[in-house]
Every structure is written in C-alpha cells, then in structure tokens.
Image: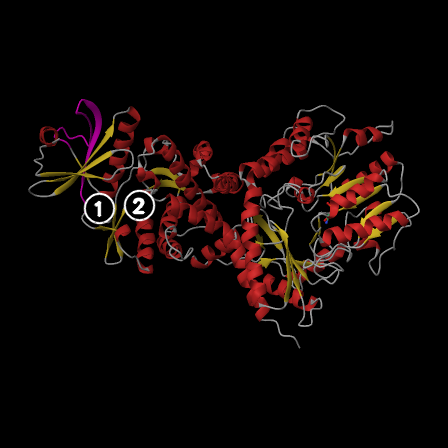
C-alpha cells in the first residue's frame, strides 16, 4: 500500500493503520508532515460514481472552510477518485484530510453538545441547499429514510416475531403517514448519518463531521431525525437528548409544521432501517459484528417510541420549536357531542372518561397525548392495530368483500384453520358477526337438535345482547331493571369457591357444586335440552369453574339428551395460557362452542363451532344466512389473528406473563388484607377487593380503577358486587407491564382512605 500511495499520490507513509468501516476498508496514513485517510472500496461503476459525487460535495463544503469536514486530496493526476489495483483487486480509492479530535461516542455529552450538533448540521444543510449533484439526486439507498421500504424485505430476517411485528407496525405507519405527505416535504442534499462515530467532539461541542458515505438527496428533516435518534437511542432518558438537537437545528434553519408532524415516524423509520439491516447482516454475514453493535439500542428506542403517544412526541417537538402545541377537545365537549345522538344506555368508563385517538399493541393513546398501558381490553387479543391483522383486512377489503352465497377460497381456508384448533368431533363452523349472534344461533341450533326448549344457565352469566341472549344471561334478566327469568330457563348457582357455599379450602368444591346440580336435575319437570356456560364466569367476577365441575355437569345434561355449549367468547384463543380453549381446563369436550371478541382482534367476527350431527339437524330446509358472517375480509382477518397467535407464540406468552402477573398479585395479597382473592389463569385474572370484615368492597375497587386510570393504566371491575378488579390485557403484554400494573395497584390501595 505504501508503494501505491507513493506512486499515485506522491505520499510517503510512515505508518498505515486500519480504521473501522461498514462496507469498505479505510486506513489512517501518517506521513512526516500530516495524517490522511485512504479510503478503498471494491470496484463497481456505481461505487465509483458515488465516490466522485461525495468528493464533489466535500469540496463544495470545504470552499470557505466553515465547518470541520474532511477535505478531498487529489492524486498526482489531479483526480479525487481513482481506480487502483490493490493486491490483485480493482479498488475505488480516495484520499481525505484527517480531522483530529475525539468522537462523540467516546465522550459523555451534555445538553449543550446536542444543541451544537443541531446547529452544526443546520449550518451545513443551509449551505448544501445550493449544492446540486445529479448522481446524489438519483442515488437510491437503504439507509435513506425516504426509502425505508427498500428494507421491508429484511423484516423476515428478524427472528423474534413480536419485534418483527413492532417494526412492521412502524413500516405501516410510515406508509400511512409519511408517504402521502412526501411531496410536501422539503428536499435537499444531507449528510444523513450524524451518529456518535461520525461526529467529532471537542469541549462538549461538535468540532466536525466525517463519513459522507450515506449522503443523500432526501427530506431535509431526515437529517434532524437521524441525529435525534442517535442522540437518544442508547440512553435511558427518552427524547431528552433529542430535543436540544431539534432546538439547535431549528434556531439556524427553521423546521416547518409538516416536518414536525412526521418527525416521530421518521425517527422510528430510521430505527427500523437499523434493526432490519442488523437482522439481515446477522443472517448473511454473522461474523460482521459492526452492523449489530447498535441493534439493541435501536430496539430499545423503538419500544420506547411505542410506549409514548405520537401526539405527545409531536407536542414535545412543537414546544421545542416554539410552535403552538395541539389543543385537544375537552372531555366535557366530547361528552356533550356524543350525547347529542347517542343514548345514555351506552355507558362510558371512569369518572373521568378517556377520549381515545389511536393505539398500538398494549398501548392506547388519548387525544391529550397520554399513553395508557392497556391491562384491560381482551378484544385486541394480539395487540391493538397489529400490523399483520390490519394489513390483512385492508388488502382483502381492497380486493373482494362479498357473502357466503359466492365461492371464495378464504372461507374454507379459514374454517379449516379454525377447526384445526378443535377436537375432531367439532368439525362444523357457522360464522356470524358477534358473540351475541353466536350465542343466539347456538341456542336455536341446540333447541332444533334436541327438540327441548329448556335451557340451563349460570348465575351471573352473560352471553349476549339479543332477545335470546338476554333470556339466557342471568346478569341481565336478574338485574333490578331486567325482565326477570323466562319460564324455560333453569338457573344454577355460580360455583364460587371464594364467596360461595363450597370453598376452595374444602376437598373438591367443584364436585360438590356439580353434584348439587345433578340432584336438582332429577327434580325438574322438563328435561334440560341445552346448557350454556363460560369456563371463567366474567360478569360473575372472573370466577373459574372449579376442578371437576363440567365433567359431572356435562354428563348429567347429556344423560338427559341435552347438549352442552361452552361460551369461549372471553376465554378462547390461548388467553388462559395452559389451554387454547377454556373447556380444556375442565378436561371436557363440549357439543358446541361460541366464539367472538378476540377472534378478529377488534373486527366483528363470531362463530358457532359444533359437531356434524348438530349442524345437520339445523339444515332442515330453512336456510341460514348471515350477510356479513364469513365474508372474505373477516376470514382474512380471522386467519391473520390465528397466524399471529402461532407466530408470536402468544399462548405461551400468556402462560408465562400470566403466571408472573398472578404471582405479583398473590404477593400483594400477603401484604394487604383488602385483597380477598386472586384468581384466574394466564392473562385472565380477577382480584377480589374486600373490606376488613371480608365483605365485598366496591368502593375500594372503584377507587383502584379510577386511580389506575389517573396513572395511565386501563383496568376494570366486575362481579355482582362490582368489587372484582379484572385484568385481561392483549397477549403481547409483558412482565415489565405486569410489574408496572401491580406497582401502581399497590399505590392505589395505599391512597384509599376508608371514611
Ligand atoms: N359471551 C360472553 C362471555 C361475553 O363476554 C360477551 C360480551 N361481553 C358475549 C357473549 C357477547 O358478545 P358481543 O358483545 O360480541 O355480542
């Protein structure tokens, strides 16, 4: 190399040292008088052109030496870029001046440094506005945020499926938010890579910037987004270091509102590029650790961005740049507008209702920019706005949406996939649009099959809002204002082993409760044709059926010629951790199963699953038709939900997180007598709050619910006395989330005063 440098550049190296490089080889060359950087790249025409363009930009910036930026040094023939044979291989070579200084990455930077970074980049970009270069303009590369989608193919290389979904989510956000606004964003040539190893540090100020390898003609704001990401991605203080970068930049080169509105998504996009490239590099070149160093930080930052609301981030950016922050509509106004057309029969949660704007995975964001940890909603089973589910629906909606009177592949495909989750005996499915429609249909079918009209239902049970749904839901018909019990309904006592007649401290309380039913069945006049029950009785206060209960009850019903329905609307799809369906917990197989809520992750799908013989009894000439049930969009969404549950191993996750979550509550119970009972399985838990004399304490439960709301955690209450805290979060809820809920739960208990 010494000879080469001497021959082509007239340089006499005393020492040559290899430097770090991402895709090329760089050398620090010391001569008698100075130091230079010799850069070599494997030859390609493209690389050659890029290097020439980069040299032009460096020359341009060095014209009046305002910033410390590497200066191109020419070879003896006057060229700045030259193809030279090195060790038998053609290389594109360049020489740059060496800038002395320490790297930002080697130092502890204080806020003033981040401001100076913003100022430095803004000054440089302001000058680059008048720099034109056709080759830079036409360069399309993966590290340029505007071309995020070039990295989409690497999503498949991210092994952890949940992480992949988070990146996928931000890709989708980019498509939905940034792409449509692209034409209104200012573009210019930017450095595009102000990271901690490209920025020089001197006395807590930026003294220079190197490595223009990622130079791009891109959105101007991408310069800031990139620097902001690197300012905070390896720290534990959120956006704190990013704000002075933005402030500094804006003070020199003002940023407009459109740019500010997209900054959150552009930062996320840069991080997505980073994690995608790292995943790909791990796969294709596992030995190159250079690409993977920053991966962990990038993931942390992406998860951090998810945990704050985009509105909160934008407001922070607006504040920093002295733009007015958003004034959200007030709750009072919102309630008034809602009440103009919506009946009071539809209640709002909390004393202080939440005005929602958007959501992602286990977070919900309100109009004020608050981010709520969702420990309550079981419908967004695989996570709010899960990108795979969202895209499945969007794509199918844009392709075909019709009804089951036409043939399309998605119906049998989804039916097959769904039924593969059931025992062979349950091999027919009827698709509808809600849990209510499913329970209504199931009861009609059961009646048809058995010819019996009597239905056995559970005390405090709830199955739906149709006429029939209310008739079979003690929670509704026995309500003070409810219609009362229908003559065909036989209601059995809830097998509560905490508050009920047989306690969990006794031997086999489930068997005792069941045997009582067997006795009662002997004495009733008309046979019971149908028995419907949930494996964990939600409205009853999250009461799991005690061990051994259903085996005895199902047998008694079947002996009478009746059929047994398991309402899996709340318990199904892996939420219980150990079991995909709640009936498995009781080691029984029902004759019919009803499904809803999580099935479409928020898209309205419900279903009745049953045996062929029950389905046959229903095909008696009277056609069954549901306009929307089983439509292609619903099937695409339902399929996507099942795939995500499998891909992200969510049943196992529910089991592990749920066990940890429950243990935290059990530990809390040891400390606080006001926690009477902790029950449930997986991510379906109930915590029963009691007063010192053991009575149901609805006031405390309400206090905790509202307190947690004020602490940005969503949770709710249930049970006949409304004293049971229920928590059924999306299954991507993690141990850290669980810890946070229980920590705040304890604080809420401590802030309660019994007057
Ligand atoms: N069954 C159970 C156990 C439920 O919890 C619900 C809804 N809370 C339903 C049926 C009715 O479902 P939907 O609201 O979708 O009609």
Residue 713 occupies which quadrant of the picture?
bottom right
> Compared to 635, does 518 lie above or below?
below
Image coordinates for residue 57, horizontal then vertical, percent: 27, 38
- Residue at figure coordinates x 56%, y 36% from the top left: 646
Question: How far, Cα to Cα, is label 2 from label 1?
Answer: 11 Å
SS at mark 1 in the image: loop
Image coordinates for residue 570, horizontal then vertical, percent: 68, 47
Image coordinates for residue 279, horizontal then vertical, percent: 40, 36
The disc placed on residue 64 is 1
Give the position of the C terminus as an image quadrant.
Answer: bottom right
**Mark 1 neighbour class, 10 Å CA radius: few under 14, some 14 to 19, many 20 or more:** few
- Residue at figure coordinates x 54%, y 58% from the top left: 664
Residue 85 is covered by the magenta coloring: yes
Q: Nearer the viewer, residue 596 or 404?
A: 596
**Mark 2 neighbour class, 10 Å CA radius: few under 14, some 14 to 19, many 20 or more:** some
In the rendered structure, the answer to whether residue 520 lies left or right of residue 597 reads right
Image coordinates for residue 11, horizontal then vertical, percent: 9, 35
Q: Identify the magenta region.
A: 75-99
Residue 96 occupies which quadrant of the picture?
top left
């Amino acid at each position: 190399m010494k000879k080469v440098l001497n021959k082509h550049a007239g340089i006499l190296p005393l020492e040559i040292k290899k430097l770090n490089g991402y895709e090329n080889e760089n050398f620090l060359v010391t001569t008698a008088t100075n130091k230079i950087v010799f850069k070599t790249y494997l030859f390609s025409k493209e690389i050659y052109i890029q290097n020439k363009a980069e040299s032009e930009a460096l020359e341009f910036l060095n014209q009046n030496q305002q910033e410390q930026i590497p200066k191109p040094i020419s070879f003896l023939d006057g060229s700045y870029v030259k193809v030279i044979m090195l060790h038998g291989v053609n290389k594109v070579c360049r020489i740059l001046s060496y800038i002395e200084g320490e790297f930002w990455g080697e130092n502890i930077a204080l806020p003033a440094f981040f401001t100076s970074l913003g100022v430095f980049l803004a000054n440089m970009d302001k000058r680059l506005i008048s720099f034109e270069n056709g080759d830079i303009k036409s360069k399309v590369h993966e590290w340029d945020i505007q071309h995020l989608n070039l990295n989409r193919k690497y999503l498949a290389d991210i092994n952890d499926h949940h992480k992949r979904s988070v990146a996928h989510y931000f890709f989708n956000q980019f498509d939905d938010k940034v792409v449509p606004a692209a034409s209104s964003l200012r573009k210019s040539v930017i450095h595009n890579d102000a990271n901690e190893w490209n920025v020089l540090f001197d006395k807590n100020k930026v003294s220079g910037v190197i490595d223009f390898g990622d130079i791009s003609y891109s959105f101007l704001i991408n310069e800031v987004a990139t620097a902001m990401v690197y300012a905070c991605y390896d720290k534990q203080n959120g956006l704190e270091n990013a704000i002075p970068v933005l402030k500094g930049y804006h003070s020199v080169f003002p940023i407009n509102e459109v740019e500010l509105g997209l900054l959150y998504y552009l930062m996320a996009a840069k991080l997505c590029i980073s994690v995608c490239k790292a995943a790909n590099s791990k796969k294709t070149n596992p030995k190159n650790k250079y690409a993977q160093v920053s991966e962990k930080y990038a993931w942390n930052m992406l998860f951090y961005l998810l945990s704050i609301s985009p509105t909160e981030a934008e407001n922070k950016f607006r504040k920093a740049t002295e733009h007015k922050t958003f004034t959200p509509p007030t709750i009072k106004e919102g309630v008034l507008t809602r009440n103009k057309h919506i009946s009071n029969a539809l209640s709002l949660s909390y004393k202080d209702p939440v005005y929602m704007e958007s959501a992602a995975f286990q977070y919900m964001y309100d109009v004020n920019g608050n981010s709520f940890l969702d420990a309550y909603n079981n419908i967004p089973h695989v996570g709010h706005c899960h990108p795979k589910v969202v895209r499945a629906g969007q794509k199918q909606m844009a392709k075909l949406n019709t009804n089951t009177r036409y043939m399309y592949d998605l119906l049998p495909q989804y039916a097959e996939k769904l039924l593969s989750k059931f025992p062979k005996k349950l091999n027919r499915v009827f698709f509808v649009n809600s849990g209510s429609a499913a329970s209504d249909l199931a009861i009609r079918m059961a009646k048809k099959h058995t010819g019996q009209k009597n239905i056995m239902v559970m005390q405090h049970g709830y199955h739906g809002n149709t006429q029939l749904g209310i008739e079979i839901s003690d929670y509704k018909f026995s309500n003070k204002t409810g219609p009362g019990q229908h003559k065909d309904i036989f209601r059995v006592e809830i097998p509560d082993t905490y508050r009920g007649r047989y306690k969990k401290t006794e031997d086999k309380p489930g068997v005792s409760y069941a045997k009582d039913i067997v006795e009662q069945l002997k004495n009733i006049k008309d046979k019971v044709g149908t028995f419907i029950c949930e494996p964990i009785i939600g409205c009853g206060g999250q009461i799991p059926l005690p061990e051994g209960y259903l085996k005895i009850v199902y047998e008694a019903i079947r002996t009478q010629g009746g059929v047994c329905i398991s309402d899996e609307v709340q318990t199904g799809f892996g939420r219980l951790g150990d079991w995909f369906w709640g009936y498995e917990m009781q080691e029984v197989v029902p004759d019919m199963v009803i499904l809803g809520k999580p099935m479409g992750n928020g898209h309205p799908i419900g279903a009745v699953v049953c045996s062929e013989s029950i389905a046959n009894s229903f095909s008696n000439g009277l056609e069954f038709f549901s306009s929307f049930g089983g439509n292609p969009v619903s099937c695409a969404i339902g399929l996507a939900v099942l795939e995500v549950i499998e891909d992200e191993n969510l049943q196992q996750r529910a089991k592990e997180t749920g066990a940890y979550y429950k243990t935290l509550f059990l530990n809390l119970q040891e400390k606080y007598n006001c926690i009477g009972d902790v029950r449930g399985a997986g991510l379906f838990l109930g915590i029963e709050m009691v007063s010192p004399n053991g009575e149901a304490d609805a006031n405390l439960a309400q206090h905790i619910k509202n307190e947690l709301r004020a602490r940005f955690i969503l949770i709710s209450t249930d049970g006949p006395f409304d004293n049971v805290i229920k928590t059924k979060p999306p299954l991507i809820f993690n141990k850290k989330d669980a810890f946070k809920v229980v920590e705040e739960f304890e604080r809420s208990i401590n802030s309660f005063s019994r007057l």
